Image (cartoon, rainbow, N blue to C red):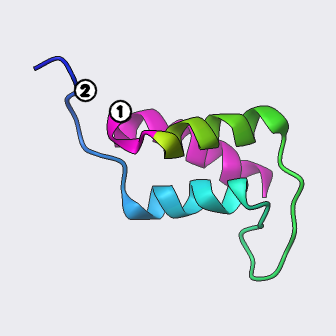
Amino acid sequence: MGLFKKGNPVTEKQIAVLEMVVNGKGSREGTEVDWPKDLVRECKKILKKPKKYTSKDVSPLVYRIFDMS
């Protein structure tokens, strides 16, 4: 039973925010943003295997994204 972590799964809104960063989009429609490479790398890692992470793991990353935008 140790395959997946216990906790709430990553939400659709969190996945949408991570995809926004990977695609280089800003929080407003039609804005292009150069996100830091380490942030993009983290987002890609989470999007590859979203079931491996919990909502609690992803929330600090989402807060960091919104602080930068």
From which residue to which does the magenta span run? 49-69
Pointer 2 residue: 5
Residue at the outermost left position: 1
**Residue 20: % across, % down:** 66, 62
Q: Does residue 35 appear to the left or right of 3 in the view shown?
A: right
Q: Which mark is residue 28?
A: none
- Tag count: 2
CB of mark 1 within 8 Å of CB of mark 2? yes
- Could you tell me the amino acid type at mark 1? Lys
Pointer 1 residue: 52
Q: Does residue 32 appear to the left or right of 19 in the view shown?
A: right
**Residue 37: % across, % down:** 82, 37
Residue 35 lies, with reference to residue 16, above or below; the image says above
Residue at 43 percent across and 39 percent down: it is 49
**Residue 68: % across, % down:** 78, 50
Circle 2 SS class: loop
Q: Which quadrant of the rendered structure holds the N terminus? A: top left
- Could you tell me the amino acid type at mark 2? Lys
Q: Is residue 19 magenta?
A: no
Instruction: Please report whichever mark, 1 or 2, sits nearer to the chain's N-terminal start.
Output: 2
